[in-house]
Amino acid sequence: EGLQSQFCFSHLLTATAGYLFFLRQQKQFTGNLGTRETSPTKGSPGDKIVLTGFFTPVGKLAGSVSPFTNKIETYLRFAGLPHRTENGGFAGSPKGRLPWMQHGQDIVADSRFIVKYLQNTYGSQLKIQEPQDAASQAISTLIQRMCEEHMYFTSQYHRMVNRKASGWFQNALFKDAPGWQSVLIMYAFRAGRSKQLRYQGVLTNSETDINQLIGDDLAALSSILDDKPYFLGSSPSAADASAFGTLENYLYDGNDDTPIPSMVRKYSNLVRFVDSVRADYYSDKLQKAGKSQ
Ligand SMILES: N[C@@H](CCC(=O)N[C@@H](CS)C(=O)NCC(=O)O)C(=O)O
């Protein structure tokens, strides 16, 4: 018997070692989403910009249903930089996420690094100005982090976990998959996203508590915006691109069975901000959508 259990034990050890080796090959210990190469910081201004992200039209949005893709498309429009857009393309992203940008030989992923890269590459050619004083620069960073690292996740609850949003979710993301398959994909996706939100922390809260957090963020944005045209003054900056990416989604993604759109509507200055950016920078897309309806 002793010999038998020893035999089992050695099998167990071999299997464990094999599994660890498998995980190592899959880069599970270092993150399996990409190679984690450091983002390029500057390119040559003559190269063309190709932005890959989520560009399937959803709801009444002028920009992307992905707040990060929306942020960069808006930044490029604010900056007056000509660009081409490509839909999809997770596989090509060095960080496994959207959006990413091809510029000459460079591939830059993550909206924060894309903005820095564009600023370093185009400098004074950009039609967009970042604030010069340290306090405003700090507020810009805080706005972006709140939108991208908090408002994104709280709204993910209402998009992908809240069952009231099932119809919207399926239609927005999987409408091209045939019937029952789209339901299966949606459930698999929902399971993955729930796990992500539990680890991230949002899903440790009840729906009432999540809504409280959403309300706090909106109140903060509304106070900072006040009656200014843009968050940091009279002209747009990266913070506005980020806030627009988030707030346009909160208002116009069409996920209207959730409380988010009506929560934003309590703040008339946030609605005014979103609507004026749409009118001033997205009239081409809005007109096209209007014609095709
Ligand atoms: N910090 C990144 C976040 C990008 C991100 O999370 N994008 C989402 C789309 S909205 C994504 O690709 N998610 C895929 C995933 O979570 O695996 C950025 O600023 O670009």
Image (cartoon, rainbow, N blue to C red):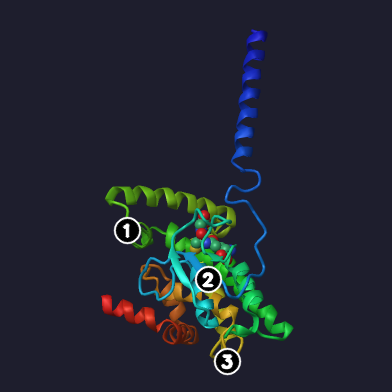
Q: CA distance from mark 3 to mark 2?
A: 27 Å
Q: Earlier in the sequence, mark 2 or mark 1?
A: 2
Where does the image place residue 90, in percent across and percent down from the top left?
Answer: 49, 56
| Residue 211 in sight | no
Q: CA distance from mark 3 to mark 1?
A: 40 Å
Q: Nearer the viewer, residue 44 or 238?
A: 44
Query: Horizontally, is 277 left or right of 104 in the view?
Result: left
Dot label at residue 175? 1
Instruction: Give the residue drawn at x 61%, y 25%.
Output: 15
Q: Earlier in the sequence, mark 3 or mark 2?
A: 2
Circle 2 — which element? strand
Q: Nearer the viewer, mark 2 or mark 1?
A: 2
Per the image, the residue denoted by label 2 is 49
Query: Horizontally, is 32 left or right of 291 in the view?
Result: right
Dot label at residue 234? 3
Q: Earlier in the sequence, mark 3 or mark 1?
A: 1
Circle 1 — which element? loop
Q: Is residue 254 above or below residue 179?
A: below
- Location of residue 88 by image quarter: bottom left
Q: CA distance from mark 2 to mark 1?
A: 29 Å
